[in-house]
Amino acid sequence: MRKRSLIERVRRVGEAGMDVVATQGRATLFLFHALFGPSGLDGRFSLLIRQLYSVGVLSLAIVVVSGVFIGMVLALQGYSILSSYGSEQAVGQMVALTLLRELGPVVTALLFAGRAGSALAAEIGNMKSTEQLSSLEMIGVDPLKYIVAPRLWAGFISLPLLTVIFNVVGIWGGAMVAVDWLGVYEGSFWANMQNSVTFSTDVLNGVIKSMVFAVVVTWIAVFQGYDCEPTSEGISRATTRTVVYASLAVLGLDFILTALMFGDF
């Protein structure tokens, strides 16, 4: 009896593993067909602009507000820690490096997954449940090209730009608290930041992180919506999976990218 139970558990683990591999294969084929198949975005630039507004512009408010407050909190915490060592003038350096290297790309990607990613999954899932995707196929239009590709490219473009905006407003929020509230000398704040931040190491690596996160988050969102069960419960589960999977992927990839970019090996 115990032997049968053990065999059954092994079988279930094997089936789960095969399902994961099959899903990854479908997702990879889905991505390559949508991006690199024939007739990509030719003649559909207006669709891309519309999705840039839906995915990027409508996410701007939460990114800006979050960036300002996170920058302000960083300045407060940094000043509290650095002042005990008599190094409070270096708070600008700490705020800038923390935002550019880590918090900017990661927090923006998490916000993007929660706001835009869930919306993309729900929108495509709703199209599937109402048979809009099937209707496009019936009239000879590839839904991967007409529906999925513009949303993928919009996500790829929007997230790096939102990350840059997050970093800028975060540094501004930190400067506002440090200089205007805590009394840090403005010249020291900006001079320490300028001397410590390098474009190739800090700014560029942060942008590269955001580009990787953009691909992963948008890919997960559109695939979950496209692959979901065409029911209200299926759409709900796909939306939840999008946020959970995208968030875990961002955090895991952040560790890997940080180790590769900034680790001393």
Image (spheres, rainbow, N blue to C red):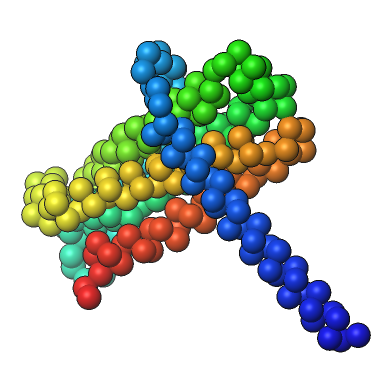
Q: Report whether 51 appears left or right of 192.
A: right
Q: Report whether 249 appears left or right of 96.
A: right
Q: Nearer the viewer, residue 59 or 86?
A: 59
The image shows residue 239 at horizontal and vertical percentages of: 64, 40
Q: Residue at x 45, y 28 (%)?
A: 149
Q: Quarter holding the C terminus?
A: bottom left
The image shows residue 230 at horizontal and vertical percentages of: 73, 32
Is residue 236 visible from the viewing direction of this image?
no
Q: Report whether 215 appears left or right of 13.
A: left
Q: Residue at x 75, y 71 (%)?
A: 11
Above/below status of 187 relative to 225:
below
Above/below status of 237 relative to 4:
above
Above/below status of 146 relative to 183:
above
Q: How many labels does the image show?
A: 0
Image quadrant where residue 61 sits = top left
Q: Which of 116 and 24 is in front in this view?
A: 24
The image shows residue 138 at horizontal and vertical percentages of: 64, 17
Q: Nearer the viewer, residue 135 or 245?
A: 135
The image shows residue 170 at horizontal and vertical percentages of: 31, 42
Q: Report whether 169 appears left or right of 222.
A: left
Q: Which of 37 and 194 is in front in this view?
A: 37
Image quadrant where residue 231 sits = top right
Q: Residue at x 84, y 86 (%)?
A: 3
Image quadrant where residue 13 sits = bottom right
Query: Which residue reaches farthest right?
Result: 1
Q: Residue at x 91, y 85 (%)?
A: 1
Is residue 35 visible from the viewing direction of this image?
yes
